[in-house]
Amino acid sequence: MSDKPIIIEDETPKAQSPFSEAWGMFRRNHAALVALFVLAVIVFMAIFGPLLYPTDPFEMVWAPFSPPGQEGFLLGTDYLGRDLLAMVINGAKVSLLIGLAAALVSIFIGVSIGALAGFYRGWVEELLMRITEFFQVLPTLLFSMVIVALFGASLPMITLAIGIVSWTAVARITRSEFLRIRELEYVMAARACGVSNTRLMFGVILPNALPPIIVQSALMVGSAILFEAGLSFLGLTDPNVVSWGQIIGSNRQYILDASYTVTIPGVAIFITVLAISLVGDGLNDALNPKLRQR
Amino acid sequence: MLVLNFSLMHLAPGDVADTISQSMGGADQEILDQIRADYGLDQPFIVQLGRYIGNVLQFDLGYSFFYNMPVTELILQRLPATLILVITAQLLALTIGVVMGVISAQKPNGLMSHFVTFLALFGYSAPVFWTGILLLIGFSLHFQWFPVAGMRDVTIEGGFWVHFVDLIRHLTLPMITLASVFFALYSRLARASMMEVLGSDYVRTAKAKGLSVREVVYKHALKNALSPVITLAGLQFSAVISGAVLVEAVFSWPGLGTLAFQSIIARDTPTILGILFFSALVVIVGNLLTDLALRLVDPRVGGKK
């Protein structure tokens, strides 16, 4: 969190939609704005990059270990003489896609478990929280390595493996939000009106519990990207696709000859995750304005 | 958070064994194709499950057909290396983190504060294996200050201290790499909790008594600011082990992570599951130790519950 002073505006408040209000708060966090822009560029590159720069990332285009900027290859070539720029561009798609999908999986699991535990209390909560604790004890990377190793390293399996091990934080946040909100008056009112449990959970409580969950989800995308990079660095990835971690892993033995083959994809991961966490920070400012007034 | 640590303590090993065997259930189909009924895999799932849990309770994790030795023995052989790495990295991260946090808390808008915020972002965003490789390129290949890989130099001869120095030389880079992820986290929390403590009444009283700033900060405030940091450090144990797997891979550190990686490639299921089980044990023990440390820092903790 940055320590910028809080500007309190003295104007008469105008009616604002929640979205524009949040955007207004978000805009004040300059780092987050820049990060959002960077992120947009990266996403654009991931989607349209392969069209704009149609070199096949698996094709051997030049002699191995040609340094960046020389012989017509902006980022040089790797140990098999493949174009590193093409690999980084194509890797963006896989890294972002897995990051997003894995975050979605873990949010889905986390929200369901947290919502059930926080809403029903009693033995349901006891059981679900025990399960959550259990998952917290298992070292996440080892666990997903085991899943990927046992069930095969296809992209959906990797996504699932990352999602399965990283939902605990979401579950905890969702649960505590549910515990707080379920006692509020408007929930009582809805309950008194005879609203069903399912609708209470997902129609009444969940929308009000969303802000911290959204912030956590943003961070989750970042850590899922790191996670995927770690797995593919170890070689636990689909050999038919390029991803940033995999470029680093496969070029690791050649750092003496060509350290840039390792540095460049690493920078890509670093910038992406940094941008995502800054945006998450901005979202935090935008969605939890109360927290800012400390 | 105390409740959490307490329930972690109550988590029986049976629980752990349970889920591990469930993932073993998934493995059966694939492995049945490769190895025959010698390993008892033709038995019904329930029988295997029961047998596995029974064995695990007696610390018998099965036999590694790849390394040709009992899994427990294999793991115990590799465990010390991982423990050395994990514990030193945690201690280093905690020390630097707390020191930086305390310094920056005294000047919330100073240079140090911004530096801590920046480092925290860096530590979170940089992939740990990448940091490791960068350090490796810089300090082992370029400057050749530290060895490139491994845990000890087998050619070295001499007494205990010679070997000790050798170990430290090998340990330095992996330890720093692993600590880099976590110290930023600790320094941020240490900074926040120190700022909170510094604003409290008893600190003002201490200042009013005429104690020097130094005494107030290090004698009165630090002890109270420490407990959230220690709690967080306890919660990070499983993340530290995950990081250790990658760091071990980068530096060829002969610990559990490297073993896990090798046995995954060799499809050595008993070993993989054994490692998973053991690392969960390590995390639980880590949490117990955290609780003990908390009681040392803050005697009130023992009173609740």
Image (cartoon, coloured by chain):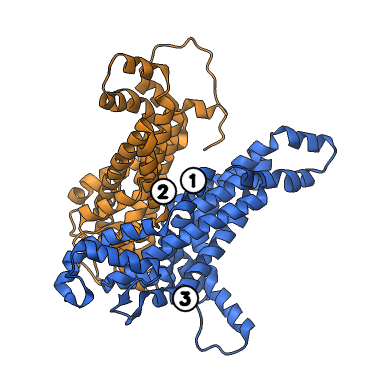
Give percent across and percent down for residue A210. 36, 30
Q: Quadrant of the C terminus of chain A?
A: top right
Q: Amino acid at mark 1?
A: Leu
> Nearer the observer, disc 3 or disc 1?
1
Q: CA distance from mark 3 to mark 1?
A: 40 Å
Give percent across and percent down for residue A6. 55, 26
Q: Are marks 3 and 1 on the same chain?
A: yes
Identify residue for label 3: B148
For the point 30% across and 48% down, which residue is it? A99
Q: Amino acid at mark 2?
A: Glu
Give percent across and percent down for residue B150. 46, 77
Nearest the eye: B194 or A258: B194
Quadrant position of residue A202:
top left
Judge whether A208 appears above or below B176 on screen.
above
Q: Which chain is blue?
A: B
Left or right for A122, reference A61: right
Chain of residue at mark 2 = A
Quadrant position of residue B194:
top right
Identify residue for label 2: A133
Q: Is residue A235 visible?
A: no
* For the residues bearing labels 1 and 2, Cβ distance under 8 angstroms: yes
* For the residues bearing labels 3 and 1, Cβ distance under 8 angstroms: no
Q: Disc number at residue B4?
A: 1
Left or right for B290, reference A121: right
For the point 69% across and 34% down, which residue is it? B199
For the point 32% across and 73% down, which residue is it? B62
Indicate the secondary structure of the residue bearing disc 3: loop
Give percent across and percent down for residue A211. 39, 30
Q: Are marks 2 and 3 on the same chain?
A: no
Judge whether B50 appears above or below A132 on screen.
below
> In the figure, what tint was chain A given?
orange
Identity of the residue furthest to the right in this view = B210
